[in-house]
Image (spheres, coloured by chain):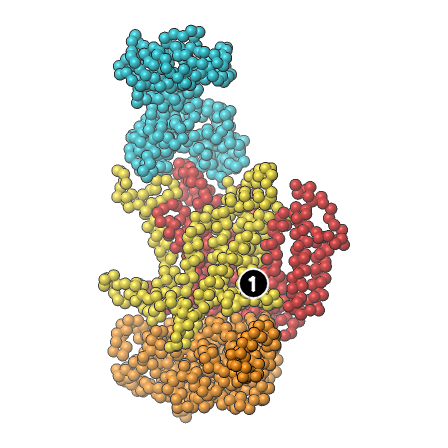
Chain colours: A cyan, B orange, C yellow, D red
Amino acid sequence: MSTIEVKKITKKFGDFVAVRDADLTVAAGEVVCLLGPSGCGKTTTLRMIAGLERATAGDIVIAGRRMNELPPEKRDIAMVFQFYALYPALTVGQNIAMPLHYEKLAKTDADKRVRKVAEILHLTDVLDRMPGQVSEGEKQRVAVARAIVRDPNCFLFDEPLSRLDVELRHSMRGQIKEVLSGLSKATVIVTHDQLEALTMADRIAIMRDGLIEQVGTPHEVFARPANVFVASFIGTPQMNLIEAELTGFADGKAEVVLAGNAVALRTDPAVGRLAAGKVTVGIRPRAFATTPAASHDTIPAQAELIEPMGAETLIHARTAAGGDIRVVVPRGQRVKIGEALHLRPDPRQTHVFDGAGKAVRA
Amino acid sequence: MTAITKLKGFATAASFATVLMVGGATYAAAEEVVLRMAVPDWPPTRIMKKFFDEQYKPPSGNKVTLDVDFIPWPDFYTRVNASLTSGEQKYNMSVSDSQWLGAFVEGGYFRKVNDIIDADPALKATMAEIHPAFYNAYSTYPYTSSNIYGFPQFPDVLVTYARKDVICNDEEQAAFKAKYNEKLPCTGEELDNMDWGTFQKVGEFFMRKKGDKLAGQVLDDDFYGIAYQAGKGYDFSSMQINGFIWQYGANIWDETKIPDGQAEGVVNSPLAVKALDHYLSLLKYMPPVAKTGTMDIFKSDELFREGKLAMNIDWIGLGEASLDPKTSKVSDKLVFGMTPGLRGADGKLIRWNNLGGQPFVLMTWNTDLQNKEAMDFVKWWLSPAIQNQFAAGGGQSAVKSVYTDPKYVTYRPWNRAWAASLDWQKDVWHVPQFFELLTQQQDQFDLAITGKQDAKTTLDNIAKFQQDLLKNAGLIK
Amino acid sequence: MAEGSSIWERLGFRRASGVGEAGWGHAVIAGLISFVYFLPVLIIIITSFKLQTEALAVPPKFLPTSFFGLIPDAYVFTPTLENYTSVFSRSMITGAAAENTGFDRYFFNSIVIASVSVLLALAIGTLAAYGFSRYPLKGNDTYLFVILTTRMLPAIVVIIPVILMFRAAGLSGSYVGIILLYTAFNLPFTIWMMKSFFDELSPDVEDAARLDGSSEAAVFFKVCLPQVVAGLAATFVFGLILTWNEFLFALLLTGVDTRTVPVGMNQAVAGGGIGVLWGLLAAIETLFLIPVFLVTFFLQNHLLRGVTFGTVKR
Amino acid sequence: MNSIAAQRPIPALMAPAPDNWKLAAIAGVAVSAVAIAALPAAASFWITGAMVAMVAASFVVNAYRRHYFGGLLVSPAIAVLFVMNIFPLLWSLGLSFFAYQSNQQTIRFIGLGNYQKLLTDNLKAPELWANLTNTAMFVVLTVIAQMVTGFLLALLFAKQFPLRKYLLILVLTPMMLSVVAVGVFFSYYYDPTFGILSYVIKAMTGGEQFILMSNKTGAVAGIVFADAWMWSPFVMLLVLAGLVSVPKYLYEAAAIDRVSAWRKFLTITFPYIRGLLMLALLFRTIEAFKMADLVILLTKGGNGTMTISYHVIRIANEQNKTSEGAALSYLLLFVVIVLTNLYLYLANRRAKGS
């Protein structure tokens, strides 16, 4: 079975802890994205799975077998490198065929496999070229082709699309997803691009400073962020995270002093069990409705900067306390600079995080 | 660089100062004369320079400086040759191996000094004091002609170095006597009287392995009886082989017989082949390095100083190092004698050897003043007083009144063999083709020494080469 | 070491954490090989502390101490610094007072002549290499090859004309003469090496600087040179090593005052009517090794990065 | 830029302009010729030198005015090389067409006589061929030994490991030694009585002293070993530079792709060091053809180790047959040039091929 289990792995470089007690399970056919800002330990985690780095502690189990001590050659994995790592002295075809030598296939069989993969990835025309003579997108596809030409335990992708321009990235995302869906292997993709993660992954593991903050489906991590970091990392424009003072809870509404105004917001009932004190209220920019008049559940603010984004418009609004709130409204809704806004958050998309930054949910 | 320009240049002030210092009494303006001299860097030349600086007072009253360029031996020829042949005219005097005379005289570098000697009866008398063997070898070109070029700087001959503690040991003496019914030479006189047969027996007798006993002591390394030069470099086999050839009554190509003397038929005469065979036959008793063709005069000397040998035949010029406990493990165990000879039918020893050492010479581009000062220096250098001092300091003298002086044998332990050796010394060729002759001969001897070619072939090859070369050069008719 | 490491891993015999790295196990093996490789040099260095009478001892004396009787005396020598003092001052005549050997001067000369000539070659050669790289002449390769050709003949062949020339120009025995000669001696190598570095640089940066109005000189000094610092260091070290030990030209073209160490070194080889003065020769060589050893050591990192020669292109 | 500057009119042949290098060259040659013919050497040398300087100056002015930066940059190097290297080389090339011995005062033009003698003379031709074969043998053996040793050493040091820096400098040391010291000390190491080699072998076999240099095989082995020991570090340094320039991720990719060690070397490592190996080969071959010092110090050319370069030293230095030595050197040079051109051709073809 093509599965990956990562159990409490830790990686230290000297005193620096790159990855701490990371747990991750990837089922056969599942695509998991490791998402996080640069330096968060996601690549190190991937390299430990590949065997390119040794785990300082913890277990790496691939296809049911503990593989901590095994070198990459013995793990039977395929990997696509960030910079593709194409062999510069070999043609594209030879590059793709490289992993096949191990299997000692007859030359015709190997050729057939290469041709088939090349066809899938539209590389047939460039098989005889050197890596230096093909485009960036083709290089990327060669790297993918080299990975999928064999039948490994699992696939690992290290920032596979980071060097492509926006358009190529978009099309490659689709292609990779399509290819992977046909292979039913455990796949780990490392990326810092949430769009990539959200579109390609079955589940996303969000990492920060060597810790896995949350693992969940794209919907989960978006709709139910486990903490302030995940909330802030996922979603564009970024979720508004507003410092507030919880004063009470009544009628399923939290009474908070928010940006200088006392408001009552409908939230998760679990908030009721929270003692009064400092909290963070997270509201996605698209979760506001603007109302003409102030109300007990609206936040007053003044439009300061307006950025049209095509179908929608992003408004930066300033609260009385001086805080900044991002609001996205449909294009049709005209807002002028300086206009007073009364923002009513969508209760279903209002998240309350406790003093430690953890989401408060039932 | 005339003395006049020198005078014009900076000497004006200097001589003015000198005159002032001497109080103006000396009227003759003291000229500054610089004699630049190329010499090999070793004690005999260092001593000469030291004596000059400390003692020499030019009779002319000029201020004479001997500016000596001490050049390490291995590079001496290269450096002097390049300087001379490039026309650099850097040196006014130079030490030269006797064999180089021809090449550099013919090239127009070494000055013939007959005119100066003829004009100076005292100098002439001094020259007459030099032993004929050295006079001929060092001063004359062509060999034994009346043209005079050089003067002895350090005359040298081969002697036998021996280990008293080994050869005089009672056990060894008895064992040798028992084995060969012959006395193992022990004293200097007994060494003087040694023939090649005894030398060979010494070689055979003293070939010992590690763990064997030698003079009552267990050896911690292999030991050998004898050694002499058998190296491919420079003249490091010819000088010994020539002795064998002459002792057998054969000859090398004889330059005194130009243009009638032949090489073919002479050099490879049956007697010469016998001589070379004899030379080769002793090699098997020598340390194994002899088989590599690199046992030159320095290597055999080193083996001797390291205590691996009972006897070694080498130049006196290397002797000081054997006597010095800093460089020799056998410094206090030495006895010296003449080199072995060939026992003739009449029971007498037939002796011949190739002499060594170096003369020094003047250059053709010297000014008259430089020549005059140089010759004054030569006269002083060859004066008995200085030669005696030189000999006492570790040099050798070819001046008769010096080496016959009873004091002479007290200077160094080998000196007792010196005077008696001089009468049977000859020299190898002095012709300009010297290096070509020598190089080819050394190459051929090396083939014989390393066992790749027999004596007959070797001498045939040498004879043929010499015949061709000398014929082309017009030296053989 | 963390939990889960075997005893072998603790000793360094581990599969290194990444490709291209190795642990102590590899270091031990490399250390052994390096030691064996270095052994002939080590023997020279050890010999420099031995008296002449101990230098050739059989069995070889290879330790200065018996480690409290652990090593048999036959293998132990009495270390001495006499050879080192002898390098500079010793008695040239048996029994006479010690006198200056001239080696202080030789060392000074070697350092001055080698460093100045290598730096000069570097300056001239770098300019030329830049020219060859950026403004190729017609038949550029031919010029480059002819330059290389000058290194192909045995030096002895050109020595006579050089001596003549030096005499005519009054350069014989002067610093200027030998320095210029060594400069020429180093140029082919310098040009070949530096050209490949310049070839490797991307001309885009230079063009950008030109568009910004920089002069050609500014482009060279401010844009190009800083990028080839490693190459300059590597070329300097190579040039230094090759010049440092040059013998023939030094023998024939230096005077008493400008003589270099390799020429003086033969004082210890069949020098004073003695075969080889082993300890003295070893001491001279050891002292002579130190400067170039230190330079190489401190420029080592550049040396590795520097010698890629531009044969490697991404 | 250059094209605009180059449009400045080129002065007429006889116009006395500072950038008229053609006129300067003609005048320079004429004046020098007169000076050499009429004046003593010391004076004519400086006059000729001044003429060369004048021509060079006009070149420089010409290059400067027309923005031939290439010429300007290259000129100092060419000037130094010309005076110190090329001129003496041409001189000795010229000498090779004369019958001339440096210790004799006569000189006679004999055209290709020296070459003819070297190639056809009954005594000299076999000697030349023997020396040439020996030299070829040394070139092949020493260069192979250096390349292999240097290569293996480079592999050893290609990885990062503790103390690497300090061990590397130990291995680099041999090439910093003077040849004299190396030669003298190796003759000691090989010495049957005193030498370490003989001592070790004797201790191991309990037998006789070991005489390495007593036959051709041993002598050649001894020389090749010393030379390879001394110069392998040079090759190592070049190869190592190539090895460390291989991006690490390629090896990682190869590990992932389960590429065998041999294939990894062939397809990844080798392309990165090929050019450097070629360069090392080129420089070491040139040096190997000049091998003489170690031969002189270890065997004096005995036991079939005579090389052509040592032969040149004998002829040109010891025997003062300057012109014959020059001719012999040019024969050697011809061989080296043919060979190095072959190298360069192959290297270029490979480079273009990939």
Q: Residue A163's x, y, as percent?
A: 48, 30
Between D204 and C171, which is closer to the camera in this rendering?
C171
Residue identifier under label 1: C177
Between C128 and B8, which is closer to the camera in this rendering?
B8
Residue A238 vertical position relative to residue B451 in the rendered view, above or below: above
Lateral position of residue B124 relative to residue A38, left or right = right
Q: Residue at x 45, y 85 (%)?
A: B386
The N terminus of chain B - image quarter: bottom right
What amino acid type should be assigned to the residue bearing mark 1? Gly
Q: Residue C122's x, y, as percent?
A: 53, 53
Residue A279 vertical position relative to residue B5 in the rendered view, above or below: above
SS state under label 1: helix
Q: Residue at x 38, y 19 (%)?
A: A241
Residue C13 vertical position relative to residue A132 in the rendered view, above or below: below
Q: Chain of mark 1?
A: C
State whether residue B308 appears in this view: no
Q: Residue A51's x, y, as percent?
A: 35, 36
Specify the farthest residue to the bottom.
B346
Q: Residue B235's x, y, as percent?
A: 48, 76
Quadrant housing residue C36: bottom left
Lateral position of residue B113 relative to residue D248, left or right = right
Q: Residue at x 31, y 65 (%)?
A: C79
Q: Residue at x 55, y 62 (%)?
A: C176
